[in-house]
Structures are given as C-alpha cells and as structure tokens.
Amino acid sequence: MKKKLLIGLGILIVVLIALYAFMNNRNRTLSPPGQAELIYNGDTVVVNYSRPSVRDRLIFGEEEEGALQPYGFYWRLGANEPTDITVSYDFMFGDTEIEAGQYVIYAFPRKGEMELRLNSDLRFWGYTEPDYSQDLATAVVPLTQSDHTEQFTITAESGSLGATLIFNWGTYQWELPLERQ
C-alpha cells in the first residue's frame, strides 16, 4: 500500500513539473524575451522585457471595448516578468533626477498618452503590481500613430543629451528620453 502511494505521488509530481514546464514555455513562446541595449561613450542602457503580439486584438482602449491594456490600468510594459532597465549614468526620468542603477519600469496607458513610472522594487514578478511606495519618478509622454508593429518592441537610441527609449506596439509609438545629468 505504501509503495503504491509513493509511486502515485511520484507520478503526480512528474506530471505537475511537466505541466509547469509546458505552460512556462508556452508563455515565453507567445511573448518571447527581448532586450534593448545601447552602448555609447562608455555608458550603457539595457532594457529587458517580454514581447507580446497584437494578434488582431485591440491593444489600448476602454475596458468595455475589450482592450488588452485598458486605459488607466497597470501594465508591466511587456508580458511575463516586469520590464527592468539598467542605466550606467545619472539621468532624468520625467522631471526627476535618478541615480545610475537598475530599476523596474511600468506604465498606465491613457487615451493619447502613456504614463511611465520608475520603481526601485526589483522583487515582484509577473502581473503582480509593484509596491507603489517604491516609485521614484513619473513621466507622461504622448502616444503617436506609427506603422504596425506586431510584437511589442523597445529600442534605445543615442542622442546628444543621453539615450531615448522608443516603444512600438500595434500602430502606437511613444518615446522616453533619459537625459544625462
């Protein structure tokens, strides 16, 4: 009897591990990891994120319209894990001076604009919202129309004042300057 119980328990554990591996791989296949990296003049900006696809869905809009990311709701700025950013120089995030380091960046989409927030809480995972008391800065930038981008994409470009992050998804684009201090 004890032997059958142990065998059954062993089979259950193997099935659960296989299910976890399948679901984890499926999520990463649907929203694979991405990285934006910029190295210039000895400075680096690295953004790690996941890349969800549009797949004929309404991306930003009202909740009652069935938008994937409804206006005014937390968005981890990608999928799977929160989006993290590492900047090797002191920079401006919106109107706030931020020290060089690693942070989490997330957003609240709004009609015609994107509210981006920088947070020092690196411990949360997945769709869990961050500890808002750990927010360091907020920047509100305009959403503009662009050519269709199927998978969410972040790129980093250098400029005379520092880096600019460029976000594209669906037919939307928004930019966030990270000016050197």
Image (cartoon, grey):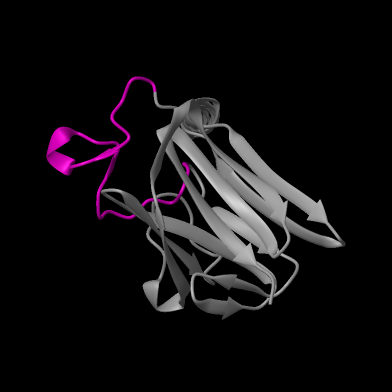
Q: Confirm whether the magenta stretch covers residue 56.
A: yes
User: Residue 4: in sight, yes or no?
Assistant: no
Q: Confirm whether the magenta stretch covers residue 171.
A: no
Q: Quadrant of the N terminus?
A: top left
Residue lying at 25% horizontally and 49% vertically, measured from the top left: 71
Residue farthest along the top direction in this orientation: 56
Residue lying at 53% horizontally and 64% vertically, measured from the top left: 123
Residue lying at 81% horizontally and 53% vertically, measured from the top left: 39
User: Residue 21: in sight, yes or no?
Assistant: yes
Q: Quadrant of the C terminus?
A: bottom right
Image x and y of residue 118, in percent: 50, 67
Image x and y of residue 125, in percent: 48, 55
In the image: residue 40, left or right of residue 169? right
In the image: residue 51, left or right of residue 179? left
In the image: residue 33, left or right of residue 167? right
Q: Nearer the viewer, residue 95 or 121?
A: 95
Q: Is residue 147 above or below residue 94?
A: above
User: In the image, which residues are magenta?
Assistant: 55-79
Q: Nearer the viewer, residue 124 or 101?
A: 101
Image x and y of residue 170, in percent: 41, 30
Image x and y of residue 81, in percent: 51, 48
Q: Nearer the viewer, residue 151 or 163?
A: 163
**What's the magenta bit mostly, secondary-structure-wise?**
loop
Residue farthest along the right direction in this orientation: 42
Residue lying at 86% horizontally and 60% vertically, measured from the top left: 41
